[in-house]
Image (spheres, rainbow, N blue to C red):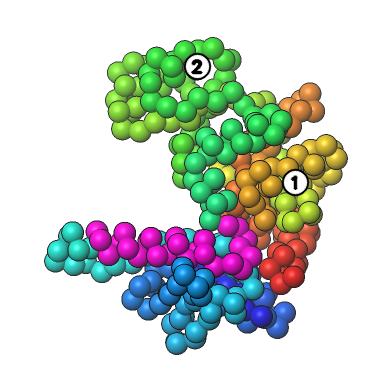
């Protein structure tokens, strides 16, 4: 049995999974895509569906040798500086096309798949997919039209904003943000996501196959990721919400995920986001939930 970890030893979560697999007696290797194409080789024949890769150190694995892949981190490819910039552009495009193709062609179990990763990159589509299966989401606007953004922000009592793609923390919209001159300048640089602020409590739910684990995140911060002292309290969410969690993972083509909710004082759960490669070591340590064991079972069985 060969299991691959998409990432590298510098990532604590990737290292933890690789070490846990090794301790369980499984052959586990890192696939650091920044080593492609200089130190990592790949091949595939679309006519016969035969393919594989040769890891650094000449370790050769055919697709049929690989049972599963744990997706921790996709770091792109690395092409050294070339005198001819057009040649470098072609090399990057060819390398990424090969990488993307083989990631979708390899028939092993992906935790998670390329399709799930693509959904996460396009967060507006993720929100639509979740809404379409009957799960409540916040009132949301994505774009760079100053008029629409101003009208949306003024129509609600409290509004937050964040990047469309991710990568920065949530902030509250203020009157200063809506100053026409400032707003026009900002929106010519980048679109933005605005959402209705949902009063209540942060809940994070991990779903691994059919296992569902939830905790309340107690923090006074608007974005709990900024609070290193946030307290995690294991809770049991309602059965109906557990079923929604399973439906979300299926709709977003996920094998496992961390779902962020906002629990309103009325008891209503509002979906915020589902992450296809969430951090989990701190959550596992604080709650005692067997996330590692469940991930290993998912990868090995």
Task: Give the crowd class for mark 2: few <14, some 14-19, many >=20 residues within 10 Å.
Answer: some
Dividing the picture into quarters, in which one does residue 137 lie?
top right
Which numbered mark, 2 or 1, is in the foreground of this view? 1
Q: Is residue 168 visible?
A: no
Residue 86, percent across and down? Answer: 18, 59
Left or right position of 194 against 252: left
Q: Which residue is mark 2?
A: 152
Q: Residue furthest left?
A: 83
State the SS at label 2. Answer: helix
Residue for point 73% across, 43% down: 247
**298 lies above or below 178:** below
Left or right position of 201 against 154: right
Residue 170, percent across and down? Answer: 52, 35
Asked if the stretch drawn in magenta spans residue 120, the answer is no
Left or right position of 170 against 207: left
Residue 157, percent across and down? Answer: 58, 15
Quadrant placement of the N terminus: bottom right
Residue 125, percent across and down? Answer: 54, 37
Residue for point 43% across, 31% down: 192
Give the main secondary structure of the magenta stretch. Answer: helix
**31 lies above or below 277:** below
Task: Give the crowd class for mark 1: few <14, some 14-19, many >=20 residues within 10 Å.
Answer: some
Quadrant placement of the C terminus: bottom right
Going from the N terminus, do you reach mark 2 or mark 1 first? 2
Q: Which residue is mark 1?
A: 246
For marks 2 and 1, give the CA distance.
32 Å
Stretch in magenta: 89-113
State the SS at label 1. Answer: helix
Residue for point 71% across, 30% down: 134
Residue for point 61% across, 63% down: 110
**215 lies above or below 26:** above
């Amino acid at each position: 049995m060969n299991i691959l970890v998409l990432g590298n030893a510098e990532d604590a979560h990737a290292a933890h999974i690789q070490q846990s697999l090794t301790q369980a007696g499984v052959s586990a290797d890192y696939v650091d895509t920044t080593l492609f194409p200089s130190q990592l080789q790949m091949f595939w024949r679309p006519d016969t569906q035969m393919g594989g890769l040769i890891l650094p150190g000449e370790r050769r694995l055919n697709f049929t040798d690989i049972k599963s892949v744990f997706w921790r981190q996709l770091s792109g490819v690395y092409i050294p500086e070339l005198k001819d910039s057009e040649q470098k552009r072609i090399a990057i495009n060819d390398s990424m096309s090969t990488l993307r193709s083989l990631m979708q062609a390899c028939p092993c179990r992906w935790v998670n798949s390329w399709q799930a990763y693509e959904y996460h990159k396009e967060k507006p589509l993720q929100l639509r997919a979740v809404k379409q299966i009957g799960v409540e989401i916040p009132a949301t606007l994505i774009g760079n039209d100053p008029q629409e953004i101003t009208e949306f922000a003024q129509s609600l009592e409290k509004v937050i904003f964040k990047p469309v793609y991710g990568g920065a923390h949530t902030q509250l919209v203020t009157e200063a943000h809506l100053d026409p001159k400032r707003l026009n300048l900002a929106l010519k640089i980048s679109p933005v996501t605005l959402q209705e602020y949902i009063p209540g409590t942060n809940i994070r739910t991990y779903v691994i196959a059919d296992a569902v684990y939830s905790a309340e995140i107690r923090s006074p911060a608007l974005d709990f990721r900024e609070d290193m002292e946030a307290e995690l309290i294991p809770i049991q969410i309602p059965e109906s919400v557990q079923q929604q969690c399973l439906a979300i993972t299926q709709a977003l083509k996920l094998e496992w995920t961390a779902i962020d909710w906002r629990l309103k004082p009325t008891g209503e759960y509002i979906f915020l986001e589902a992450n296809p490669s969430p951090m989990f070591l701190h959550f596992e340590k604080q709650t005692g939930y067997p996330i590692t064991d469940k991930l290993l079972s998912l990868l090995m069985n």
